[in-house]
Amino acid sequence: MTACRQRRSRSWRGLGLAVLLLASCDASVPRARVLPGPDAEGPVDPQDIQCRSQSRDPGRVTLHRLNRAEYDNTVRDLLGDTGAPARDFPPDDHGFGFDNNADVLSMSPLLMEKYSHAAKQLVERAWANGTLRTCELDAAAPEACARDLLRTFARRAWRRPVSEQEVEKLVGFVAVARQQGDAPEVGVKLALRSVLVSPHFLFRVELDPVSPSHAPHPVSDLELASRLSYFLWSSMPDEALLTAAEGGRLRDAAVLEAQVRRMLADPKARALVDNFAGQWLYTRALDFAEPEARYGFDEPLRQAMREETKLLFQEFIIRDHRLKDLLDAPFTYVNDRLATHYGLPPVGTDAMTRVSLEGHPERAGLFGKGALLTVTANADRTSPVKRGVWVLEQLLCKGPPPPPPDAGGLAPAVDPTLNIKERMWQHRANPTCAGCHTLMDPLGFGLENFDPVGRWREKEEGGAAVDPSGELPGGKVFNGVVEMRAVVKQDPDLSACMTRHMLSYALGRGAEPEDRCNVSDISRQAEAQGGRLTDYILAIVRSDAFQKRGGETEGPTP
């Protein structure tokens, strides 16, 4: 018997009636209003009523270590080094679907050793390239040049002004070098390495007020600048952003919006595509997909699928599409290899080219993308469960609970004329799994016209006709991907769920049940402004959750 669930992200524990009612995974049809049509009516959520008068808790972000992507981007912007040294670091853990979650970014002795080695290599390369030598070190009196050089470097690396005491400590390495009979540049390079292994570089530090209090407080302008740059660029603030923060202007609404728009127009905003969308939409997982050889999946196809999804999301950053239109955008990017795979007219080039999907509505939006369809399939067959769970978790935040421990896999096909939908009927017939599969399976069936690598098909490999129809709890029915995505796009939880994922990524912490009101505020504000990706980003950076930090009193002294 197939598992009620392959896995469950802890992101959505306790969120909403749908999850609570599914928690038992029993055979009863969930009573919560799930995936209604546009004319559906349901009870007003009492939590929404509470949000109208309830104060907002911004929550607290744990001391945030730079993850591998952030480290590589930061040394790129600080030193001009594109060698991606973090490739040699241990892999980052994931929390709430993202690898920038501060709660799981631990520090091990091995990682500290890697940081030390990387710092030495980075400084040596930058010194040889002249990147760091902003003045000439006088052999007899090198302190003045060293002081200016180190002050400038530490300010950028630590993403804040440095005190004179901190500068003098760094300059002290020159004296140490002199005592050992070494040239002044040896001491300066030691100081530069110490800057790169300092907690002020490796961590995003946010300080609480001197007087401990439970009351939320605004993060400093400099801390806000780092929150903003690591959200949009996965990297350090540039000079324009750092200067605005040092001048105390970043909280001005017009200045903040101007900075956001400037940063989104910068090529460094590609980090949002690679790191946010890459994890939210599972594009990164395509690197590890290994469909069986009979499907003709190869590296050029993998690369084209990866670029298609990235270019699609990139367009939502730079143009005026509504974020919800990701589900049915009537255009995509293909080259000849991918166009042939999709059954589209060739574009006459190996370069990814923007094309209209007029006449091919099945390919519109996320559900027609080979990257998504491949990573949510098994190596040897499609998986309605995986695909259905992806829709529930990533788009609607209604993921079901974990499977029972004795759940098994899909039974072998005794009758080759049965399609996968008929073979999976037993899941809904079994009381243990019916409650979950009644919600998951239909959404996956809506994508059954796509094979394990995203090619369109009318028949399964055994010859059975594909049945892409589905019926959801509450009686909502659809037939095929076009009707299914319309149902998902109309779901009232879509906007809040997209907000929840983006807020989790922006803050580097999971959006918990206590963030429900923050999520609701951001979602409504974004949609009121037009519902574009930029509107969601602006609503997030203006929110208390992004601009403030929860207070914490000191515990008892042991």
Image: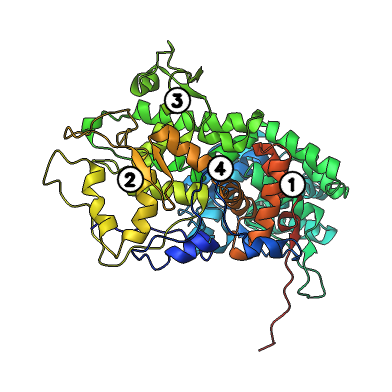
Observer-nearest of 429 and 545: 429
Q: In this view, does 424 lie above or below 14?
A: above
Figure quadrant of the C terminus = bottom right
- Residue 520 percent coordinates (x, y): 67, 54
Could you tell me the amino acid type at mark 1? Arg
What element does badge 3 sit on?
helix
Residue under the image location 79 percent in, 56 percent down = 167
Comparing labels 4 and 1, the label whose residue is closer to the camera = 4
**Could you say which disc has been placed on residue 156 in the image?**
1
- Which of the 4 quarters of the picture holds residue 535? top right
Whole-Å distance between the Cαs marked 4 and 2?
Answer: 25 Å
Could you tell me the amino acid type at mark 4? Pro
Could you tell me the amino acid type at mark 3? Pro
Whole-Å distance between the Cαs marked 3 and 4?
Answer: 21 Å
**Could you say which disc has been placed on residue 361 in the image?**
3
- Which of the 4 quarters of the picture holds residue 101? bottom right
Residue under the image location 43 percent in, 38 percent down = 484
The earlier-in-sequence mark between 4 and 2 is: 4
Whole-Å distance between the Cαs marked 1 and 3?
Answer: 49 Å
Mark 3 vs 4: CB contact within 8 A: no
The earlier-in-sequence mark between 3 and 4 is: 4
- Residue 60 percent coordinates (x, y): 67, 65
The earlier-in-sequence mark between 1 and 3 is: 1
Could you tell me the amino acid type at mark 2? Pro
Observer-nearest of 144 and 260: 260
Residue 247 appears in the picture as rendered: yes
